[in-house]
Amino acid sequence: MNARAKALGMNDTNFVNCCGLDTDGHMTSAYDVALMSRELTVQYPQIHDYCTIWMENITHVTKRGSSEFGLTNTNKLIRQYEYATGLKTGSTGLAKFCLSATAERNGMELIAVVMAAQNPADRFGDAVTLLNHGFSMCQLYTDEHKELLESLPVKRGVKNTVKLDFKNPFQYLSTEGDDLASIKKSISLPKDASAPIKKGDKIGKAVYQIGEKTIGSVDIVATEDIEKAAFADYMKEIFFRYFS
């Protein structure tokens, strides 16, 4: 657990046990809990399917038979905050009342972490305040690349051109009130490419700017394999050119 935490950049965290109960040397920070929460939700987004369940009946089976009891979600934001998507409550005598709250609005996901609240109501209220502040300050720009890229000429290949596509959508999160409508996208590609070319090879890139500031880029990649032409391929091309 400590090795994984270090790899995530959780520099204020030291695990002494795996249950989270109070013990000497067992500690973390709000920032580290946010890092851990982000890793969980990004790698396993289906966690939201579970932590947004409000009530569930559980059947407890033992040697003496089975009994059914109900569980209610301890994260009250699931019912109180319309954008809530999770994530985890916790409390101990020393840590008091804590919460890692996730929420999504207009395609933007935020995480707010509250620690050491004096009571459950305070942790939920503080989390809502943080999330509302985040949503008011943040703007998300997304480019899904609706335009089609022209094929690029290929030198010394079994095909004369290679098809291209963007490697992934582009997203930019602004926290400074940028005018997202002013974002400019420029395509940078060579005049041609030389075979052999493998599917996924980087050929160029799309660069995004606000004014003179570059805010990010997306690779442009080949979508097919192009083998290097052999002598027989050249002879075949000459034959079809003059006799077809």
Image (cartoon, grey):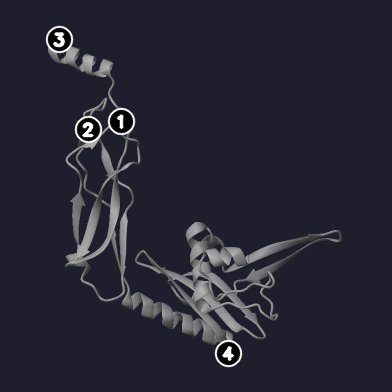
Tell me the kind of residue under disc 3.
Answer: Phe
Q: Which residue is mark 4?
A: 118
Question: Measured from the top left, where is residue 191 in percent x and y?
Answer: 16, 40
Indicate the quadrant where residue 158 lies.
Answer: top left
Q: Give the spatial CA distance, label 3 vs label 1.
A: 25 Å
Left or right of residue 112: residue 18 = right
Q: Which residue is mark 1?
A: 226
Question: Measured from the top left, where is residue 2 in percent x and y?
Answer: 61, 67
Considering every residue shown, the one lying at the far right of the view is: 64
Q: Say whether disc 3 or disc 2 marks the residue closer to the N-terminus.
A: 2
- Dot 1: few (<14), some (14–19), or many (≥20) neighbours within 10 Å? many
Considering every residue shown, the one lying at the far top of the view is: 243
Task: Determine whether label 3 and label 2 are within 8 Å by CB.
Answer: no
Q: Give the spatial CA distance, label 3 vs label 2.
A: 24 Å
Question: Measured from the top left, where is residue 223 in percent x and y?
Answer: 31, 38
Q: Which mark is residue 243?
A: 3
Q: Give the spatial CA distance, label 2 vs label 1.
A: 9 Å
Q: Is residue 143 visible?
A: no
Q: Which residue is mark 2?
A: 154
Q: Say whether disc 2 or disc 1 marks the residue closer to the N-terminus.
A: 2
Task: Determine whether label 2 and label 1 are within 8 Å by CB.
Answer: yes
Tell me the kind of residue under disc 2.
Answer: Val
Q: Please determine whether, in this image, residue 64 is positioned above or below residue 160.
A: below
Q: Give the spatial CA distance, label 4 vs label 1.
A: 64 Å
Between 86 and 237, the residue placed more toward the observer is: 237
Q: Quadrant of the C terminus?
A: top left
Q: Secondary structure at mark 3?
A: helix
